[in-house]
Amino acid sequence: MSCVIAGGGPAGALLALLLARSGVEVTLLEKHGDFLRDFRGDTIHPSTLQVLDELGLAGEFLELPHRKAYDLFMVTDRGDVRIATLRRLPGRYRYVAFVPQWDFLNLITSAAGRHPGFRLLMNAEAYDLIREGGAVRGLRYRDASGEHEIRAELTVAADGRHSVLRKRAGLVPESLGAPMDVLWFRLPREAGDRDDTFLRISPGHMMVAINRESYWQLAYLIRKGGYGELTRQGIDALRGPVARLLPWLGERVAGLGSYDDVSVLTVMIDRLRRWHRPGLLVIGDAAHAMSPVFGVGINLAVQDAVATANLLAGPLRAGTPIPESALHRVQRRRMLPTRVTQAAQRVVQNLVISRALTHRLDPSGLPPDLTRIPVLNRVAPRFIGHGVRPEHVTVKEL
């Protein structure tokens, strides 16, 4: 086996596709039986759309049920504020596509399955590394039939922000902090509701509303560690703010029967100082957990996968040993985008989110169109749409 990847999220799935299409034998492990985790992000940005285009998958992607957002809006107590427009971005894709991530992952793994060197193992949980001669030589996993080993020239840990393989390798991320957590729940959508996905902000409260056609996927922000106190106050402590933020929901807020209807997402920003050991590379959330600010987590993971494939597919296909210096080149290329993106997220967290949740920010006085501000007009769309150092697929299909 040339490569084994733990984790069927965006980083792991796309890397598996890129390697398989270039002639590398690769096995992808996903610990669940499907990709249907409702807390997965929905935002596919222009940088990822461009990657799909380069892979010949853009047409299939756009056949999935999706919504295009050319403009991004914040809703205040006084009305809508346009905070960014992607309409003037260079290239073909000038919008964010909102697609449930399970549809995106099914598309990627289905495309990978067209290549003979790809193997997908579902319900396969990686729990340890195989070490020989001071290097990682594969991993151990368990499924319904027991415990197994896969030996490989390269093992990739793409198993998320609570990565087991990262821990087994002794790699400890540096925490950069976050002032909030997120309550994730859904309420029915009706015909007269607005069509877009938007940020709702009011002194003391913030919420993102994602239009998933038949229902609203809602992300209500609370201060870090505040969930216990909220639950002690009862479900009305959540229903009340939601009803005030979105009064047009009316009696639908009663659909929140209890906190059993709510998932708590612990927000964190962290990153590894070192993304590799001999024979092991860590990418995606396992290497750098991102805040939900800007919705760029999926896209950073995709960029990691593209950079990894561009740099390592050739040696893996040739069967030559992968020196740790080659793994470090992946880290060196992707560390700058990680640092800059996380720094921008922390600025927003400190200046906007933290202040809003503690009643120190009222955006009602903002002008209705922030895109008229020259800096925001030029910088924000490129940062949101393309990110820092967008990657392009250079590895060839065989």
Image (tube, grey):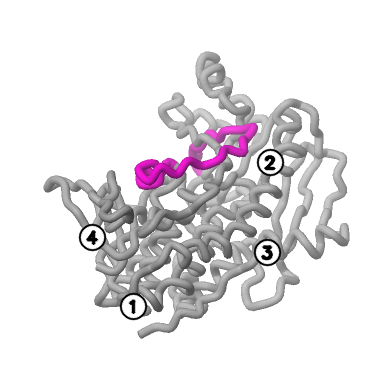
Tell me the residue that label 3 is attached to. Answer: 70
Q: Secondary structure at mark 1?
A: helix
**Nearest-to-viewer mark from 3 and 1:** 1
Question: 1 left or right of 177?
Answer: left
Q: Secondary structure at mark 3?
A: loop
| Highlighted magenta segment, given as a residue range | 162-188
How packed is label 4: few (under 14 Cα within 10 Å), some, or many (20 or more)?
A: some
Q: Secondary structure at mark 2?
A: strand
How packed is label 2: few (under 14 Cα within 10 Å), some, or many (20 or more)?
A: many
Tell me the residue that label 1 is attached to. Answer: 317
Q: Which label was assigned to residue 200?
A: 2
Query: Is residue 56 magenta-colored?
Result: no
Residue 387 occupies which quadrant of the picture?
Answer: bottom right
C-alpha distance separating marks 3 and 1: 40 Å
Residue 158 occupies which quadrant of the picture?
Answer: bottom left
Nearer-N-terminus badge (3/1): 3
C-alpha distance separating marks 4 and 2: 49 Å
Q: Which label was assigned to residue 272?
A: none
Q: Which label was assigned to residue 151?
A: 4
The disc labelled 4 sits on which kind of residue? Arg
Are circles 4 and 2 on residues that touch, CB within 8 Å?
no
Q: Is residue 288 above or below residue 105?
A: above
